[in-house]
Amino acid sequence: MKMLTWWFRIVGAFYLLLALMNMYIVLLNPSAISAMATFPFPTTTDTVMAFVDGWSPFAFEILGIGTFMIWASRNPRRYLGAVWLLVWLELLHGVLDDIYLIVRGYDAVSYIVFIVVHLIIIVTGIMAVRKVEAQGASAMPVARARA
C-alpha cells in the first residue's frame, strides 16, 4: 500500500507542478510560449494566442487530476480505478499524442523526454496497483470445496 500511496503523491505533485507552469503561461504570460516552443509553422501573435487558448483546458485538467491524486493518497486502496484511468490517459493523451506531435514536426527531443516520463508513470502505476491487489488476494481466506 505504501508504494501506491507514494505513487499518488509523487505523480500528483508532478501534475501540480506541470499545472502551475502551464497556468503561468495561460494566465500570466502567454507570449512566453513563443520563446519556449518551436512551432512547425509560421506564427503570429494571433496564432500564439489561439494555441494558448487551446492549451488552457489541458492546464486546468492537470490541475484537477493532480489535486485529486494528492487527496486520493489518503486512502489509495479506495481509488484503484483512478490509477487505471490515469494509466490509460498517460498512454493515449500522453504517449500517443506526443508521437503525433513529433510526426507533425514539433521538437522531437522534448517530446521523447515526456514519452519516457509517461512510460515511467504507466509502469509504476501498474506495479503499485498489482502489488495492492496481490496483498488483498493473499489476505482473503481460501474457500473450501463442499463435499
Image: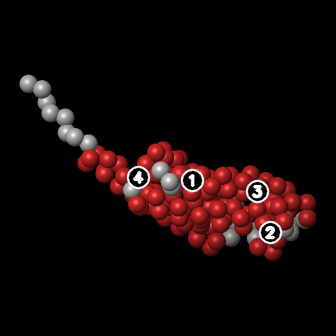
Residue at x 78%, y 66% (from the top left corner): 24
Circle 4: residue type: Val
Counting residues from the start of the chain, the first of labels 1 and 3 encountered is 3
Counting residues from the start of the chain, the first of labels 4 and 1 encountered is 1
Badge nearest the viewer, 3 or 4: 4
Circle 3: residue type: Trp
Circle 2: residue type: Ile
Residue at x 72%, y 54% (from the top left corner): 60
- Would you place residue 142 above or below residue 60 in this image? above
Badge nearest the viewer, 2 or 1: 1
Crowding near pointer 4: few (<14 within 10 Å), some, many (20+)?
many
Q: Mark 1 points at which residue?
A: 71
Q: Mark 4 points at which residue?
A: 129
- Mark seen at residue 55: 3
**Tag 2 near tag 3, CB within 8 Å:** yes
Counting residues from the start of the chain, the first of labels 2 and 3 encountered is 2
Helix, strand or loop for disc 1:
helix
Q: Position of residue 140 (x, y in %)?
A: 26, 42
On-image quarter of the C terminus: top left
- Would you place residue 41 above or below residue 63 in this image? below
